[in-house]
Image (cartoon, grey):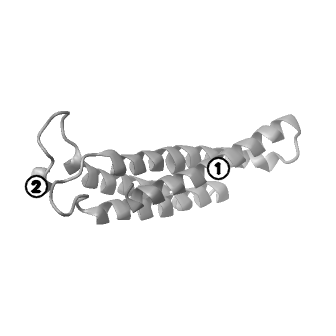
Amino acid sequence: MPRLSVWMIRTALIYLGVGFFFGGLMLFNKGIPFDALVWRLLPVHIEILLLGWMLQLAMGTAFWITPRFSSPSRYGRVHLAEAAYVLLNAALLMGIIGQWSSNQMLAASGRVGILLAGLCFALYIVPRIKPLGGAQAEKGDL
């Protein structure tokens, strides 16, 4: 498994653990109320699980499993996928802090960063996608 896939999947599993912890905290608060402010974690919980866990896990798996090029640089323009990884995690943290602190500008900046991360990853992965049983993917196929 490529190193970038390992990092993406490990990071996704960290987000899964944090998201489950926040969800468990809110669930515990439903049964035995201890603080009403715990419910401010709900949008953060959703963002962590949807974008931090699911999106990052999908990106890490896609990086690993899509067909490789036949040329020596088997994974193509990896710098785009690396930029997507860094941008996604930085933007996700911005969005989480923005949601938690009710700073709408920071949360919106995080959303734009997530959009840019998705665009970077899409630009990276599209040349590696080919039809089932199709010809070998080449770098210039975009």
Residue underneath mark 2: 140
The percent position of residue 16, horizontal first and vertical second, equals: 60, 48
In contact (CB < 8 Å): disc 2 and disc 1: no
- Position of 21 with respect to 7 (left or right) is right
Q: In the drawing, what numbered circle is on residue 132?
A: none
The percent position of residue 83, horizontal first and vertical second, equals: 36, 64
Q: Secondary structure at mark 2?
A: helix
How many labels sit on residues? 2
Tell me the crowding category of disc 2: few under 14, some 14 to 19, or many 20 or more residues within 10 angstroms, Cα based.
Answer: few
Res 81 → quadrant: bottom left
Res 5 → quadrant: bottom left
The residue sitting at 29% across, 63% down in the picture is 78
The answer to whether residue 92 is visible is yes
The residue sitting at 43% across, 54% down in the picture is 114
The residue sitting at 11% across, 41% down in the picture is 135
The answer to whether residue 109 is visible is no
Q: Secondary structure at mark 1?
A: helix
The percent position of residue 82, horizontal first and vertical second, equals: 36, 64
Tell me the crowding category of disc 1: few under 14, some 14 to 19, or many 20 or more residues within 10 angstroms, Cα based.
Answer: some
Q: Is residue 1 above or below residue 26?
A: below
Residue underneath mark 1: 17
> What amino acid is found at the position of numbered circle 2 in the picture?
Gly
- Position of 34 with respect to 125 (left or right) is right
Going from N to C along the chain, the mark reached first, 2 or 1, is 1
Q: Is residue 26 above or below residue 139?
A: above
In the image, 106 versus 10, the foreground residue is 10
The percent position of residue 44, horizontal first and vertical second, equals: 62, 49
In the image, 28 versus 2, the foreground residue is 2
> What amino acid is found at the position of numbered circle 1 in the picture?
Gly
- CA gap between label 2 and label 1 equals 40 Å
Quadrant placement of the N terminus:
bottom left
The residue sitting at 53% across, 43% down in the picture is 50
